[in-house]
């Protein structure tokens, strides 16, 4: 009879063999506590992405941070609450976000492509077909797609939950967006980089907090472990669990890991027992 430990080992083996990988970088990973870009950390992650790509794997990045970068450039002391101001910050920050990625990847002779998405790109069959064809072509050409919500024209992610109808909500944060992109392009693995080492039984700073290394089933008790973020990003552990649910229901694998840990991507992709791994339903 297969044990939870056996299932976890099998899942880690599948992580190590993943060929198409989606990596989501949260705002709390690419920006410092004072709101400035964590340039050294970001360059370290990008170098890891390059190493993974040179190992023969395909990589897509889903990156947050445009609104935070825009707000800082505009001299705002805090992230705006007004929708129009959020969109303005996104418009200012998105180009700066892409400039960071382009400059960093250029050092490694790798090309990036900006891909901005709205809900309609997933709802309209023709637009989705075009999106899938474009992403497949970029990957075949060895390009690193940098994906983000098109916050300048799309409002669902920027509105508070009570302000938009859930019946029209395709994704409300970049965690879910990364899960949808991952399943739609039939990737093998989703890595959600956070500022904590995975899912814990309570706040990671609590003395009795324990890391949940393997998740075989997303239960109500597991969801209760999730805590909200620190306010700079729009997601939190709860949204990462929902993203993992989408991925595992599609028969694929998700890992939550600490993006501030050096060479974390190499460790995850090597199948090491690090972070929290969510097993696909087919393995249950």
Image (cartoon, rainbow, N blue to C red):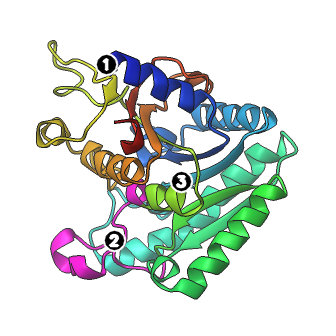
Quadrant location of the C terminus? top left
* Residue 164 x %, y %: 23, 80
**Which quadrant would the N terminus be assigned to in this image?**
top left
- The residue shown at (66%, 79%) is 130
**Tag 3 residue:** 63
- Say what secondary structure mark 1 lies in: loop
Local SS, label 3: strand
Q: Nearer the viewer, residue 270 or 48?
A: 270
> Furthest residue to the front?
1
Marking on residue 158 = 2
Gap in Å between the C-alphas at discs 1 and 3? 41 Å
Query: Is 113 on the left or on the right of 218, as rendered?
Result: right
| Mark earlier in primary sequence (2, 1) | 1
Q: Residue tagged by mark 1?
A: 1
Q: Is residue 155 in the magenta section?
A: yes
Q: Closer to the observer: label 1 or label 3?
A: 1
Q: Residue at x 38, y 61 (%)?
A: 76
User: Which image quadrant is residue 218 in?
Assistant: top left
Q: Main secondary structure of the magenta part?
A: loop
Q: Verify CB contact (< 8 Å) between mark 2 and mark 1.
A: no
SS for dot 2: loop
Residue 38 falls inside the magenta stretch: no
Q: Relative to residue 163, is residue 233 depicted above or below?
A: above
Q: Residue at x 22, y 21 (%)?
A: 205
Could you tell me residue 136's position as x and y percent? 72, 63
């Amino acid at each position: 009879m297969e044990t939870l430990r056996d299932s976890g080992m099998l899942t880690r083996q599948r992580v190590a063999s993943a060929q198409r990988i989606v990596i989501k970088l949260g705002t709390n990973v690419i920006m410092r506590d004072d709101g400035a870009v964590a340039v050294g950390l970001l360059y370290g992650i990008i170098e890891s992405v390059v190493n993974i790509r040179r190992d023969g794997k395909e990589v897509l990045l889903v990156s947050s941070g445009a609104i935070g970068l825009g707000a800082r450039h505009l001299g705002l002391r805090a992230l705006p609450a007004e929708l129009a101001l959020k969109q303005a910050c996104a418009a200012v920050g998105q180009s700066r976000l892409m400039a960071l990625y382009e400059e960093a990847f250029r050092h490694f002779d790798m090309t990036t492509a900006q891909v901005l998405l709205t809900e309609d790109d997933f709802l309209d069959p023709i637009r989705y077909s075009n999106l899938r064809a474009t992403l497949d072509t970029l990957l075949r050409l060895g390009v690193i797609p940098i994906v983000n919500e098109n916050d300048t024209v799309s409002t669902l992610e920027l509105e508070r939950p009570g302000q938009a109808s859930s019946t029209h909500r395709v994704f409300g944060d970049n965690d879910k967006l990364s899960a949808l992109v991952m399943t739609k392009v039939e990737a093998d693995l989703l890595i959600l980089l956070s500022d904590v080492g995975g899912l814990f039984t309570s706040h990671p700073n609590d003395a009795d907090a324990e890391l949940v290394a393997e998740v075989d089933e997303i239960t109500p008790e597991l969801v209760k472990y999730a805590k909200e973020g620190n306010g700079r990003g729009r997601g939190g552990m709860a949204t990462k669990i929902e993203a993992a649910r989408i991925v595992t229901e599609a028969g694929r694998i998700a890992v939550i890991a600490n993006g501030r840990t050096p060479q974390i991507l190499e460790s995850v992709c090597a199948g090491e027992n690090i972070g929290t791994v969510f097993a696909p339903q087919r393995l249950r």
